[in-house]
Image (cartoon, helix red, strand yellow):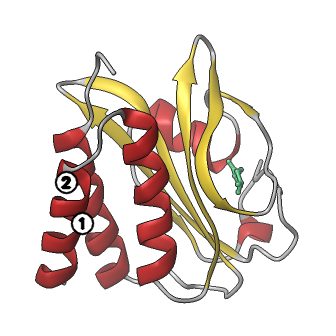
Amino acid sequence: MEKLLKTAQSLFKEAPNNIALLANASAFIMDNFPYLNWVGFYLKSDNYLILGPFQGKVACEKILINEGVCGKAFFNNEVIAVNDVNLFDGHISCDSNSKSELVVPLVKNNHKIGVLDLDSYLFKRFDEETINAVKAIVNALMGSYNFSS
Ligand code: SME
C-alpha cells in the first residue's frame, strides 16, 4: 500500500494539468486494483456532475447532484461503498456488468470538486482495505489538483 501510494504521488506530481492528472489517475487505479470494470471522475458543473476522464465502457455524461450513488456521495460529502448495486435505491446503471461500487468525493481546501467512481463486476468488491487505499490515493490526487489548470 505504501509503495502504491508513493508511485501514485510521483505520477500525480508530473501532471501538467488537471485533465492529464485525472486521466492518468483513472488508468493508474484501473491497473492496480483488480476486478474493476469502470473507474472515472465526475466533476461538478452547476447542478450536475459531468463525466470526466475515465477507463471503461461509455458512461452517462450527466448526473444530477444528489442522484445516484455519485450524486449522493457528492451531496453528502461522504464515501459510499455499495455491496450490491441492485439494492441501492436510485442507483444509475451505466454498465450492466457493474455489481458493486465505491464513490469517493473529491474535496480540496473545502471546495467540492466532484467524485471518483469505481465499479466492480464482483459483488462486495470494496472491503475496508481497498476503501482506505483509494481514499489515500484521492488524498494524494487532491494534493496535485490545480484550481487554475
Ligand atoms: N452508478 C453511478 C453512475 C455512474 S456509473 O457507474 C459510471 C451512480 O449510481 O451514480
Q: Which mark is residue 140?
A: 2
Q: Are marks 2 and 1 in contact (CB under 8 Å)?
A: yes
- In the drawing, does residue 87 fall left or right of residue 107? right
Please say if 133 is above or below 67.
below
| Element on which disc 1 rests | helix
Please say if 9 is above or below 108.
below
Residue at the image position 40 percent from the left and 58 percent from the top:
25
Image location (x, y in percent) of residue 14: 22, 50
| Element on which disc 2 rests | helix
- In the drawing, does residue 95 fall left or right of residue 108? right
- In the drawing, does residue 1 fall left or right of residue 56? left
- Ligand 1 lies under 8 Å from the Cβ of mark 2: no
C-alpha gap between disc 2 and disc 1: 7 Å
Looking at the image, tell me whether mark 2 or mark 1 is earlier in sequence order. Answer: 1
Residue at the image position 36 percent from the left and 27 percent from the top:
112
Q: In the rendered picture of this protein, how many numbered marks are placed on residues?
A: 2
Q: Residue furthest top?
A: 46
Residue kind at label 2, given as amino acid type:
Ala
Please say if 87 is above or below 145.
below
Neighbor class of circle 1 (other Cα within 10 Å; few <14, some 14-19, many 20+) is many
User: Observer-nearest residue: 129 or 4?
Assistant: 4
Please say if 3 is above or below 140.
below
Residue at the image position 36 percent from the left and 40 percent from the top:
106
Residue kind at label 1, given as amino acid type:
Ala
Residue at the image position 69 percent from the left and 36 percent from the top:
67
User: Observer-nearest residue: 73 or 16?
Assistant: 16
Image location (x, y in percent) of residue 89: 75, 53
Image location (x, y in percent) of residue 134: 33, 67
- In the drawing, does residue 95 fall left or right of residue 130? right
